[in-house]
Amino acid sequence: MWKGTLQDQYLSTGQEGYAFAAPVCYPDGVELIDCALGTNPLGTPPSVKAVLETAKELSVCGYPEPEPERLKETIVSKFPSWNVRPEHILVGGGSMGVLVTLSRLLLGPEASFTGVSPQFTDGVLQGMYTGASYHPVLPEAPGFIFGGDIPQRLTASASSLIYLDRPNNPTGQTLSLEMVERISREAMNKNTWLLVDEAYGDFIPDEESAASIDLPNLVTCRSFSKGRGAAGIRVGFALTRNRELAAAFRKLQPPFVVGVLDALLAEAILQDDRFLEETRRYVRSAKEKTIRALQGKKGLTAAETDLRAPILLLTRDSGDLVAMLGASGISCEPGTGFFGLDNSSVRLRVPSPEHLDEFLRRLDAL
C-alpha cells in the first residue's frame, strides 16, 4: 500500500555524505589514530565541563525559548568586528540544521547553484534535495588551487545561489575576505545569493570572517563543532543583514530547536578564549609538521591548503589511499564521500596531541 507514496524523487543523486562511508579494515593490535571527522583535536573544552558540573538542578521540564535570545546577545558582544545585532543572527540545530532551513528557503526545483568542488558534501546534498541542480566549478586536481579565474567562473552563470565553505572542506583552503566580498558584489548584481559556510571559521581571526561583510545577498553560517570543540551540543548559527530572509527563516524553522542546556553550553564556550587560542596554536603547529612529513613522499600530493585549518586533502597517484592509511592504523575521510573524488584521495584532520608523534612516524613510513 505504500508503493509510490514516498516523495523521494530528489534522493537519487548516488552520492553519500562522508559520514556514511563504507567501513575501513584496520590491523589488529595497532592503536587507531583518529584523523577522520572534523572534531576538535584537543577534545571537550573546560567550559563545557564546568557548566555540566553545575547543571544538576537545571530544569528541562519546560520548553526552551523559541530562539535563545541570550545566546544571540552573547554572539553580538563576542564578535564586535562583525558589527551585527541580535536580529541578524539565526540560531539552529547545528550549522547543518541551519543549512537545511536555508536550502529550503533559497533553492527549489527550478533553481540551480554552484560552488568550488570538492566541498562539504552534505551542504551540497541538502541543496540538491530541494530539487535544485548543482553545477560546480572544478579546480585542477590534485592541487585544487582556488585562484585564477575562480571568482569569475562562480558568478558567470545565472545561478540562484553560490555555496562556499571557508575554509574549504576537504582541502582546508581559505578564500581571502577581499575575494569573498568581490564574489558577493558581483553575485548581487545578478540577484544571486552567496552562502558562506564557515564551519571551520574559528580557525581564522574573527575580523577575517565573511560575517563582517555588510551585503544583503550574503549569509554566513558558523558552527560550535570544530574550533569550539562542541560537536555534540548541536548548536549553529547564521548571520544575515537581509531582514526579509531573517523573517522567512524564523517562520520556516521549527520552534524550540536549541535546548536549554545546549544554549547554556554554547554561551559558556564563547567565553572560553583560552581553549580556542590553544586549539589554534596546536592545529597550526601540527599542520606544519604534517605538511613537512608529506613533502617529498613519492606518489602523494597534498592539495593547496591553509596552515591554520586542521584539515587537508591528500591524493595518491594510483591505488587506494584509504586502505593504505588504514593498514597503518590511521583513520580518514575517504574521497568517495566527496563529489568528484575516489579513494585515491582522503581528507585528513590533524590528530590529538598525544598521537601526533606516532602519526608523523606512520606517515614517514608510508
Image: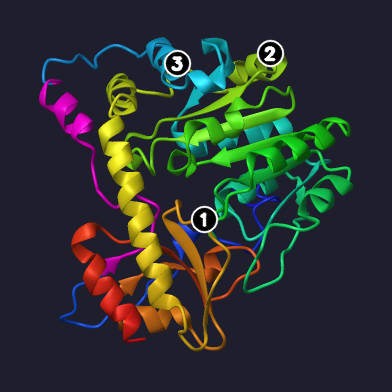
What's the amino acid at mark 1? Answer: Asp
Q: Which mark is drawn over residue 243?
A: 2
Between the residue at mark 3 and the residue at mark 2, the CA separation in whole angstroms equals 16 Å
Q: Is residue 96 above or below residue 19?
A: above
Q: Report the residue at 72% width, 64% height from top.
A: 139
Residue type at the position of mark 2: Arg
Residue 94 in sight: yes
Whole-percent x, y for residue 334 in the image: 47, 69
In the image, is residue 350 part of the stretch drawn in magenta?
Answer: no
Q: Is residue 120 left or right of residue 205?
A: right
Q: Are dots 1 and 2 in contact, CB under 8 Å?
A: no
- What amino acid type should be assigned to the residue bearing mark 3? Lys
- Relative depth, front residue between 95 and 12: 95
Closer to the camera: disc 1 or disc 2?
1
Compared across the picture, whether 220 is left or right of 321 comes to right
Q: Regarding mark 3 in the picture, which secondary structure is present there?
A: helix
Marking on residue 306: 1
Residue ID at (66%, 73%):
141
Q: Residue at x 26, y 34 (%)?
A: 274
The numbered dot on residue 72 is: 3
Task: Identify the residue at horizontal 22%, vertical 73% (top origin).
Answer: 358
Is there CB contact under 8 Å for labels 3 and 2? no
Q: Is residue 80 or residue 348 the one in the foreground?
A: 80
* Foreground residue among 212 and 336: 212
Residue range corresponding to the magenta coloring: 33-55
Q: Is residue 37 magenta?
A: yes
Residue 160: x and y, percent? 80, 38
| SS class, disc 2 | helix
Secondary element under disc 1, as helix, strand or loop, is: loop
Dot 3 or dot 1: first in sequence order is 3
- Indicate the position of residue 75 as horizontal and vertical percent values: 44, 19
